[in-house]
Structures are given as C-alpha cells and as structure tokens.
Image (cartoon, grey):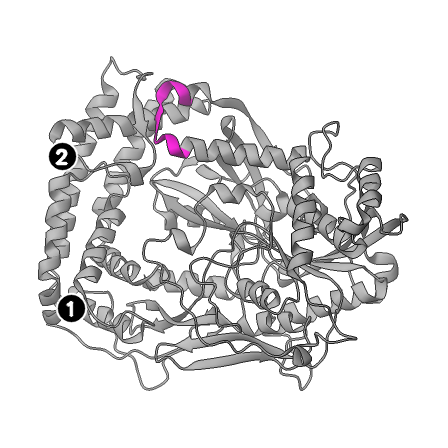
Amino acid sequence: MKQDFRLHSVIVCGMLVVVVPWLMGAAPSYERIEESHLSSLASACLQWHVSKRALTPELAAATLSNFVDILDYGRVVLRQEDVDGIHALRATFPQAYANGDWHFITNVYAMFLERIDEQLDYARGYLTNAGFTLDMGREIVVDAKKRRFANSGEEWRRGIEDALQYQVAYLVAIGEPLSNAVDKVLKRRERQARRFHEMKHEQRLGLFVNAWCMALDPHTAYLSYDDVEDFNINMNLSLEGIGAMLQEEDGVTVIKGLTPGGPAERSGLVKPGDKIFAVAQGDEGEYVDIYDMDLREVVKLIRGKKGTVVRLKIVRTGPQGPTRLDVRLVRERVKLEDQAARMEIVSTVRTNLAGEVQVVRVGVIDLPSFYADQNERGLLRRKSTRSAVADVRRWLQACVTAGVDGVVLDLQRNGGGLLEEAVDVAGLFLRRGNIVLAADRRGVVNVLADTDGSIYYEGPLIVTVSRVTASGAEIVAGALQDYQRALIVGGDHTFGKGTIQQVLPLPGKLGALKITVGEYFIASGRSPQHAGIRSDIVVPSELSAYEIGEQYQASALPARTVPSQLSGRTRTGAVPGGWDPVSSEEIARLALRSRERVEASSAFQRVCESVKKILADREKGAVSIASLLAAANTNIGPVELDRAEEEPMETRQALTNDLVVMEAVEIMGDWVTGAGLVPEIKVIAHGVLGTTNTLCTDGAEGDGQEGLSTGRWARGCSEVTNEVSETVRAK
C-alpha cells in the first residue's frame, strides 16, 4: 500500500541549499526506508520537479537502466538475459507506483547477488590456477560505456578474465610484483562480494530511489540519513581532512576536485583525476587497500583530527603512462580565509602604437567560490563583513590605488556558492543592472539585479573560466559577457549548470530528497544550462580532454530561453565617463594575437599534445596488456611536504603558475596597448621581432615559466602600496 507523509520545504540561497528543520508539529518517527515509502518519494519528486511532472514509459525505462548501471557499471557481472529481464519490468512500473508494491527490487538484487557469487567463484579459480600469467596479446575494452553485456556463458567468462587481466596488469604496471598483484585483485573481489551481501535492505532500496532520481536529471538525488549528516558537515565547513571531493568509478576512488584552501590543494601534490588505491594513518601506519571499498568507508579513513597525518598511495595517469606516488598530508580544517579571494599584480611589457616600450600592470584576482561568513556580520548591517563581494571590492580598490591597467578575474576553479554574492560580484563592474533571472516550476520568473549604483572598477576586464566553472560563476561570466563588460578567456565552455536544487527533509531517519525545482537564466534570457558559457578567446586546457560538464550527462535537462531583461547602457554605466563595451572587432584582434602566442609556446604545445594523447587513447576503445605494461612509468617514490613538522603552507599556489591566467595577462597587454592593430603593422612587426611574446620560448627551461617570479598574496588594502606583490615579465 502506498504510504503518505508530509514533506516540508526548505530555504534555497541561490545555488547553496540550506536545510531547515520541521516547521510544524512533530515529524513521524520512521527508522528506515521501506518499499511502502517509495511511491510517496517518487510522487514528491514529480510534484516538485521543474519539468518532469508525470510517470512516463521513458522515465520508467531510464530508471531501470540506471539501476542496472548502479549495480553493474563495469558490465561484467550481469548477462544480457538478466538485463533484458530487468528492463521488462517497465511494464509493471505504473502498477508498482500506484499500489506501492515494489517487491521486484528485492528480486532483482537477489539475482544480482547470485551473479556476484558466480563471478567470484570463477575469478578465484582463474587467479589461483598455477598456470596464470598475463596474456600480452589480450585486447581489453577499458571504457565501460563501450562494453556490452555477455550474450553467452563463454562471453561472460571472457569478460571476467578481461577484467582480472587488466586489474593485475595495472598493478604490475605501477610497480607491484605479479604474485602480490594477483593476491590483491583476488582480495578486492572477495571484499566487493562481501560488501554487496552485507548491504542493508534500506541501502538497496536507496539505490533504486537514486536510479529514479537520476532519470529525472543529474542533480536530483535521494540522500540517506547518513548522507544528510555528511551534507550538514560540509555545509557548516566543519570537515577536517585533506579537502578533496571523491567519487567511485568502477571500484576505484577518484579525486574529482580539490577544495580551495584545503591541505591537498595547498600542498600542490594532489591533482583532480588522481586515483587513490591505499590509505595509511600517521607516518608509521600500514596502508589499507581501498579498491572496491565503499566510498563512505574511504572517506572515514581519510578524515581525522586536525594536525594528524594521512598518507595516500596515488596513481596518476599521464601521456607516458601511470605513475605511482606516495603522498603525505596533514589534516586541517578548511577555513574561510583559505578559500577567500586573493590578488597579485603582474606586469608585462609591450611596444605601444607610438613605438614606445610600455609596462602594463594587471591586477589578477583569484575567486574560488562565492562565500560569506554567516557568523560575522557588521553592526546593524545585513551583509557579512567577510564575503566574496566584500573581498573582491577591497581588491578592486587596491587595484585602483595601485594604478593597474587592467584586471583579470579568475573563475577557473569557481564552482558556485551563494547566488546573492555572485550577483553582487558581477555588480561591482556595472553601475546598476539585471544580472540573473530565476524561474520556478510554475514558470514564475524573478529578477535579481545589482542595485548598488557604484562601479568599483571601470577599466578593461578579463574573466578566465574552465570546464569546472559552474553555477554562480557562470552567472557572473555570462552577465559580464552579455553586457560586453568583460572579455571571457579560457576553456572551450564552462560546466553548464543552469538549474536550482531544493532539499526536502524527510521524516524520521528516512533522509532527504534533493530536487531540481527551478532554472536560472542570464539577464539576456539565455541559459548556461547544458552548453555552458563559451569563451571569447579559447586557450588550450587539459580539461578539454575529459567529459566534464552537464552536456555529458545522459539525463541533463535541455537549455531553453526566456525573454531578455538586459538593462540599458545608461543604467549599467556604458556611457562616456564610464566603462567601454568590448567590441567584436576587439575580440577578433586579441584572439589572433593570442593564437599566435599559444602556437609559439612550448608550454601550451605540451598541453595540446597531452590532450591529443588522451583523446587518441579513448578513441582506440581497446588496449592490450602488452601496451599497458610498455607504457608503465615505474619511477616510484614518496612525494611529501618538505616541512613535516611545520604547519601547512599559508597561501595557495601563486597565480603566476597558471598558464591560462598568464595568457590572460598577455591578452590584456595587447588590449591596453593596441598591439595588433592593422594601421600600426610596422610598429607591431618591430615589436614582435624585437621581443619575445610567448609564454615559453623554445630555448626556455622546460617548466614553461620563463621570466616568472613567485609573488606574495597581499594581506590588506591598508598596506597596498608596499604589500601587493608584483611579477614583471620581461619582453
């Protein structure tokens, strides 16, 4: 029978969701999720979702397909006949939804456990056979999306053998002796089977609910009671660990992102895409193999008390093959000041239109997120005294005081945050104007505008972006682009998230639902959803080799448009005495100069070669055991902080170490000096021939940082005249 219970709404602060407690009366005390709850959960999703309002055959089919992927992402456990049987259940979906009878979920999971046991038995016999050896000529399809389920027992056994061969070979490729590699793979298989058998009934149902949510869109999700606890920890920034976002991919724990200001990001030792295979506590603890370990258990191993040591065995894949690294980090609490905006002043030299050598000084502001300290508010003020907009405003005032020629706002790592802060940051560069339009599931559109009336910086502005630039950061980049206020430089597109989520807490210990309830649009009426914001000038990035973004999600909602509500130029300040709009002619000129510089840069060419190698490997579809071992990089060694007994580094990596940022500085140099204008072709030719206008000349040292010196993060505006760092690039 379908069981009904009440859901209470929550407050949504832009892209940051804040859960509020039950508002009225006592909540029913449910200890765990049951089959009788599933129809109510599905109904709640349809009631609140921005566009999916009814159960359709397509939704049912997508849910079952997602359930198969959740159970057997690698496509080596189930057979095609099993998958066909699961997909046939879509015919019973409407009845299950109407009656609250979802017993088939238990039946499917029982069948899955049978296949798990069969697979383990076969794997055990295959690996313990005295004649086991690596089959050098074996071709293996590495990308699970390109595999198909086995149509026969022979194909099924072959698939298991392929998986075992690849896993053993991978360990051998990173330096593990063959016997140890075989033993580790077998133990991993046994642990995986044990984990599936020990999964509680409510956890199994949770998998199905998430399969349903994933069919609606990539951001709608079911959060178990434990997930909600983790969510609250992250929202309160009380997590002590290494500051890394983890995701499980086919049994492997992968670092998907680094928290700005966290120990991992500050150390410079860990990168997104790194795979963690083992975790150890302290300097003497033994490593624990985490392959196929539940992600929640992995997180528990990595988290710990502030000041304690955690060691990670990491595998990093590069153009030359996999490299194993031993990384030592000290756990810390991520502080607001560690995630705050920072600024450096960088200088580059040009020959201007008059033939004179000109030093161009550029203020580079790094803004990792849109934050605000909710516990630190000014007296009788609504605004926090420590926030993204307050910090960026201070740095812009410092730039004006220092007399910079241009500003670069770096949003490459900015994944969003508080919507109000994003709107106000965009408003720092405009007098007034509409910034973003938010539409709810009823179609009601609310306009969020900058109403300050002040322009804190009127000069040339470049915003740098990447494929991980998302949500609020896409609003800022898109608004400044549509108003022709800024030049957008960086990756081919931003993430493409143009939706708003709301968290609905469930009664008792049932957890919560996170549902996509709205969409947002740039004031011009276009949406960043799906395609993201396109750069005016694209600069090579290794991220372009990876499928990062909404457009690569199977259930991503399509983009749509609403009527434009762009404000006029008089209102925004694009008038004489205000800021100058960026013209298409200007963009074309600067893009040409940038392309010439990038093509001549050995640093950027290395990036392009790496991208080509990754894409070529992906297109191959299959890899042989021999080629995997041949590409292995077995230079194994520890990678540690040099100051083991000291506090972690106080500042993040210097902005001048970022190729995209430094190319943006060069573009700004061209912009403010008029370099590349056709009427001055002779002067420009003289300037280009007489100076080096690349990021790294062929004769430069291999790190691509010729002429760079590490600047310091200015500590306060009151000391801007002697504390703001400057990096001068000789040209």
On the image, the x and y values in percent for residue 646 come to 69, 44
Residue found 24% across the figure and 14% down from its top: 130
Residue pointed to by mark 1: 36
User: Which tag is nearer the camera, tag 2 or tag 1?
Assistant: 2
Residue found 73% across the figure and 50% down from its top: 665
In depth, the one of 511 and 595 nearer the eye is 595
Near mark 1 (Cα within 10 A), the count class, few <14, some 14-19 or many ≥20, is some
Residue pointed to by mark 2: 151
Image: 217 above or below 292? below
Give residue 577's mark: none
Magenta stretch: give its range: 618-628
Give the position of the C terminus as an image quadrant. top right
Residue 286 seen from this side: no
* 480 on left or right of 562: right
N-terminal of the pair, mark 2 or mark 1, is: 1
Image: 73 above or below 397? above
* 311 on left or right of 444: right
On the image, the x and y values in percent for residue 97 come to 14, 68
In depth, the one of 343 and 146 nearer the eye is 146
